[in-house]
Image (cartoon, rainbow, N blue to C red):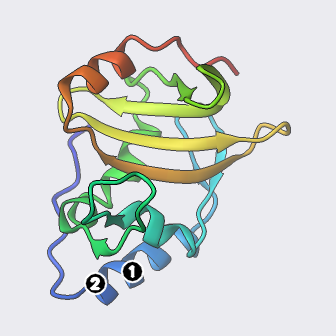
């Protein structure tokens, strides 16, 4: 499966409307193994914004064009049967968490995270390029996610 082309909009609002049309209004989007994933408008800021201050406690305050341009990769990554889903890591518990399903496109270091509830349904959490080699390696070596 070839990756979708990068999006090229002029404004942040155009990216937001694309997200709403493509994901929120089309929800659920199904993963390759038939898990329905819901997308909500309020996730836009969390997913497509970045912190301009270095602190992890700082607010995300700036639209991240690199994330926005790759928006159409989210569906591609969720639906690619060649990508092995991994368990997400919970820093607070210092352990892997099977309710967090991480799908990682290795060639591009592109990560998509969904939350899986007890009924087996998904909620989109975030997606971004992993720009740290050590973090990317840790994700690649995370335990496989189990249905």
Rendered-image quadrant of the C terminus? top right
Q: Locate residue 108 relative to residue 50 in the image: left or right.
A: left
Secondary element under disc 2, as helix, strand or loop, is: helix
Q: Locate residue 60 relative to residue 14 in the image: left or right.
A: right
Q: Residue at x 28, y 74 (%)?
A: 62
The reply to whether residue 95 is visible in this rendering is: yes
Secondary element under disc 1, as helix, strand or loop, is: helix
Q: Which mark is residue 116?
A: none
The reply to whether residue 22 is visible in this rendering is: no
Q: Residue furthest right?
A: 119
For the residue pair 24 and 100, the one nearer the viewer reads as 100
For the residue pair 127 and 95, the one nearer the viewer reads as 95
Q: Residue at x 33, y 88 (%)?
A: 13
Vertical position of residue 27 compared to residue 89: above or below:
below
Give x and y (percent) for residue 1: 27, 37
Q: Which residue is mark 1?
A: 16
Task: Determine the image quadrant of residue 41.
Answer: bottom right
Give x and y (percent) for residue 103: 44, 32
Q: Which residue is mark 2?
A: 12
What is the tally of numbered marks visible in this picture? 2
The answer to the question of whether label 2 and label 1 lie on touching residues, with beta carbons closer than 8 A, is yes
Give x and y (percent) for residue 74: 39, 51
Mark 1 is surrounded, within 10 Å at the Cα level, by few (under 14), some (14 to 19) or many (20 or more) other residues, namely: some
Vertical position of residue 17 compared to residue 70: above or below:
below
Q: Locate residue 75 relative to residue 26 in the image: left or right.
A: left
Vertical position of residue 147 compared to residue 21: above or below:
above
Vertical position of residue 90 compared to residue 75: above or below:
above
């Amino acid at each position: 499966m070839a990756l979708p082309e990068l999006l090229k909009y002029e404004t942040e609002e155009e990216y937001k409307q694309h997200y709403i049309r493509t994901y929120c209004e089309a929800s659920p989007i199904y993963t390759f193994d038939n898990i329905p994933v819901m997308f909500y408008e309020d996730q836009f800021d969390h997913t497509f914004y970045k912190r301009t201050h270095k602190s992890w406690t700082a607010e995300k305050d700036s639209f991240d064009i690199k994330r926005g341009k790759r928006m159409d990769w989210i569906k591609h990554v969720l639906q690619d049967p060649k990508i092995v889903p991994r368990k997400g890591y919970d820093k607070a518990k210092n352990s892997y968490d099977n309710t967090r399903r991480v799908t990682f496109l290795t060639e591009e270091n592109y990560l998509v995270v969904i939350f899986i509830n007890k009924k087996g349904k998904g909620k989109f959490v975030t997606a971004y390029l992993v720009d740290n080699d050590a973090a990317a390696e840790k994700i690649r070596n995370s335990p496989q996610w189990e249905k």
